[in-house]
Amino acid sequence: MERKAFIFLFIGYVGFSLLGALLLLLPVSRTGPLSFSDAFFTSTSALCVTGLIVKDTPVFFTLFGKFVILTLIQLGGIGYMTVAGIFLHRLRRSLMFPEMMAQGFPELKPGFAFFFARRVIIYTIVIESLGAFFLFLAFLKYYEPPLAFKHAVFQSISAFCNAGFSTFSDSLVGFRGDVWVNLIVILLIICGGLGFFVMNEIKDYLSYKFRGLGLPSGRGKRFTEQGVKIFRFSTHTKGVFTWTLLLVIAGFVLIFLLEHNQGFASFTPLEKILASLFQSVTPRTCGFNTVDFARITPATLCFVMFLMYIGGSPGGTAGGVKTNTFALVFLWIIHYLKGYKNVYLFKRKIPDTTVEKALIIVLLSISLLVITSFLIFAFDSRVFQYHNPIEVMFEVFSAFGTVGLSTGSRLYSNVSLSADFIVLSRWIIIVLMLVGKIGILSLATYMIEKSKVEIGYPEDRYIVG
């Protein structure tokens, strides 16, 4: 069933990308000529909530074209399998629905699939609406109400879905010093990156703390000996909060120190602080930016690549290998060096199968990045006439992490470096975005064959290291 669910998931993403591309090819969607590969690239980037672009979104696409892109972003942000599952459940055709949901939300209990899918949509609508409202208030000092509302809605959905598409040609560079715009977008990105499981536990905690309601999800509920309900966050949620906070703080400090007298030299002190904080959050994994990454030092680019690789947290709108995954591999190494056979976190033992999954995800993702980078290096010599290898690798990591950050094109204005790639390289980037969105573990699950009876060969020495 897992293989069928993956095939259904993969075909669905490709099918929606194709449908989006066909809609973008309509004359009503664009203001100029558009090739099929560019339309498919844009559609896939939107559906995979990446944000890499080969056409200047606010200029090239009409209002209808922007609506198509926004719809794809929303569909990709909450997961099309979530929306499809709701309809399948209503039609009583939900046998594959739990498996579909499991591809996007690992560890989800089958009996909780429909209930959780409904909550995902509710959380999305509420958070995006609040984000749009506050952004609308912030944009009022720059634009008339109708235009401010359009910008606010698009930016809110794109930020929460960690997409990075913008109705501004320079992304959010023009708002580099605006405290409210920066903070609102940062909060939307973090909310989307935390994951819906964490949001669910937060909702349960607030219900328990302030209203005394029951805990319908069954997560985090505990009882004392006297039968009084108490609440405990799960190890997953504690891990998400911890790793997210550490990465944001470490990213802010390091980027500030690296760029203080470099890329941010002409900024005011407030702009330096906001830019460092924003660029620490946005690689995980929203492609909004308030600085020109073409002017960023190579050291910062390498660090941002590291953040893009990690990405957000499981079960959310972000991409990457996920915070919990990378942290678990790191913890496994530390525990192994200390002589422990198991991994412990917050006084809890992490199952061996979870550790194995984390190791597989990290190893396969690194292998994928190396192979795809090699293919681009081997077949696209033209791009190196305009860009250095770090900038090209930055684009590759951005595609895999479904981030959307880019050092920019040297041939065209206000588009990503991908616009300078040959057609083959663009299709490689498309595949990377799809794999990054669907998940490397889901792909591995499809490739792994059923367990076989093993022959009991004798052991022999095999030297490593």
Image (cartoon, rainbow, N blue to C red):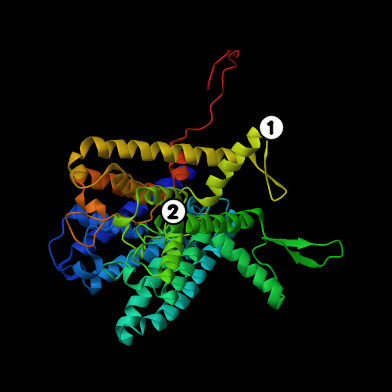
Query: Do we see residue 453 in this rendering?
Result: yes
Q: Quadrant of residue 369?
A: top left
N-term-proximal mark, 1 vs 2 = 2
Given the current orientation, which residue lies at the most extreme bottom position?
145
Give how far across and how far down residue 408 sits, in percent.
Answer: 26, 56
Query: Do we see residue 213 in this rendering?
Result: no
- The correct choice, above or below, for 35 with respect to 153 in the image is above
In this rendering, the count of numbered labels is 2
Query: Considering the numbered disc 2 on the image, is that residue within a helix, a strand or a loop?
Result: loop
Camera-side residue of 460 and 111 = 460
Given the current orientation, which residue lies at the most extreme left position?
33
Q: Which disc number belongs to residue 339?
A: 1
Give how far across and how far down residue 335 sits, in percent.
Answer: 65, 38
Give how far across and how far down residue 103 sits, in percent.
Answer: 48, 50
- The correct choice, above or below, for 92 with respect to 389 in the image is below
The amino acid at mark 2 is Gly
Give the side of residue 278 with respect to residue 266, left or right: right
The amino acid at mark 1 is Gly
- The correct choice, above or below, for 303 with respect to 39 in the image is above
For discs 1 and 2, the disc positioned in front in the rendered view: 1
Q: Which disc number belongs to residue 319?
A: 2
x 69%, y 51%: residue:
346
Give the side of residue 62 with respect to residue 394, left or right: left
Classed neighbour count for the residue bearing mark 2: other residues with Cα under 10 Å, few (<14), some (14–19), many (≥20)? many
Q: Which disc number belongs to residue 104?
A: none
Query: Considering the numbered disc 1 on the image, is that residue within a helix, a strand or a loop?
Result: loop
Classed neighbour count for the residue bearing mark 1: other residues with Cα under 10 Å, few (<14), some (14–19), many (≥20)? few
Give how far across and how far down residue 118 sits, in percent.
Answer: 52, 67
- How far apart marks 1 and 2 lie (CA) works out to 33 Å
Given the current orientation, which residue lies at the most extreme right position?
226
**Do the CB atoms of the residues marked 1 and 2 lie less than 8 Å apart?**
no
